[in-house]
Image (cartoon, rainbow, N blue to C red):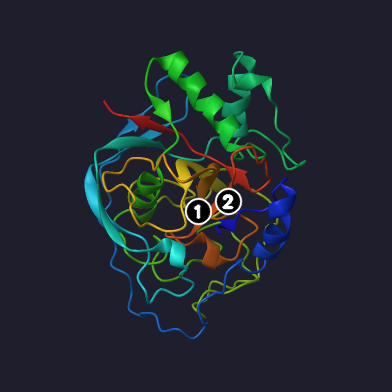
Amino acid sequence: MPRLSYLSVTPLLSACLLVAVITPCVAQAPANRPVSTAPAPTPTPVTEAIIKDCSDCPEMVVIPAGSFMMGSPAGEVGRDADEGPVHRVTLQQFALGKTEVTFAQWDACVADGGCNGYRPSDQGWGRGTRPVINVSWNDAQTYVQWLSRKTGKRYRLPSEAEWEYAARGGTTTPFHTGNCVNTNQANYDGTSDYNNCGAKTGQSRKQTIAVGSFPANAYGLHDMIGNVWEWTQDCWNKDYSGAPTDGSAWKTGACAQRVLRGGSWINSPLLTRAAERSGSTAENRSFSNGFRAARTLP
């Protein structure tokens, strides 16, 4: 069963979700499991190439082709079985949103006759440059379809492999920031720690914040840790046995559920690791879920 994002509107999932806010729906690794305390190597930032296909379109960062080991190693604190087996994935270049899609960008879609006219609630937190929330996987599809119609380009959701490759930004540590993360680097629930690394700062913002509020990773992407869970294209599968190795989306499995990545403002740092996986029904709208767009190149 996936670690499910909070909150589901599906009764069968709700009990698990409410538990998952505090602790995953599966047993966590022991808190004293060893992890390297050596400083994480700093990846070399790539030359950032930005695409913006229209005035209302999101800024897209060109992610270079490459390969990486997807998943988490056996010794990573908090690792769940669905994060393995670790396997090499080789990807072609693609473009990914520099930030999560914002309310302003979603509202532009609605104003242009797209997104099925759906205007999601902002929970009273504000719209503008905050990430759009209360959008389902199905809703996200309407947005990327609108971008494709408007620009003539191939917009879509990223595959799960593309998302993790981009989130890591060349790193192999639990976070692109290293073996730890801080609430000055990401929007997560800082009342919990991660392996006693100092992620527990006591700060919990209890809501989303404007995208791009923190430094980008080596690929120039913001908020790949926390703020909102991000929908990916893939069907849910319980682990990576038989997963694609070319960076494409996994189109078989439990396709009524889709994969979410990155964790959110309401989650502990453990649930914002680069390898962390969650899943929810494709129609689920939650105040912790959003997405970022991807674009096929050329």
Give the label on residue 227, or none.
Answer: 2
Query: Mark 2 packing: few (<14 Cα in 10 Å), some, or many (20+)?
Result: many
Question: Is label 1 in contact with label 2 (beta carbons under 8 Å)?
Answer: yes
The foreground one among 253 and 111 is 253
Residue shown at 47% from the left, 60% from the top: 276
Q: Which one is in front in this view, the residue at disc 1 or the one at disc 2?
A: 1
Is residue 220 something one can see in this rendering? no
Residue shown at 68% from the left, 61% from the top: 16
Nearest to N terminus: mark 1 or mark 2: 2
Residue 219, position as x, y percentages in the image: 33, 47
Residue shown at 33% from the left, 53% from the top: 242
Residue shown at 54% from the left, 63% from the top: 271
In the rendered view, tell whether residue 237 sits above or below residue 55: below
Is residue 173 something one can see in this rendering? yes
Instruction: Answer left or right for 87 relative to 254.
Output: left
Residue 5, position as x, y percentages in the image: 62, 53
Name the residue tied to disc 1.
262
Instruction: Answer left or right for 120 relative to 228.
Output: right
Query: Mark 1 packing: few (<14 Cα in 10 Å), some, or many (20+)?
Result: many
Give the label on residue 60, or none.
Answer: none
Query: SS at mark 1?
Result: loop
Instruction: Answer left or right for 10 relative to 149.
Output: right
Quarter of the picture containing the N terminus is: bottom right
The foreground one among 248 and 193 is 248
Query: SS at mark 2?
Result: loop
In the rendered view, tell whether residue 156 sits above or below residue 200: above
The amino acid type, in three-letter code, at marker 1 is: Gly
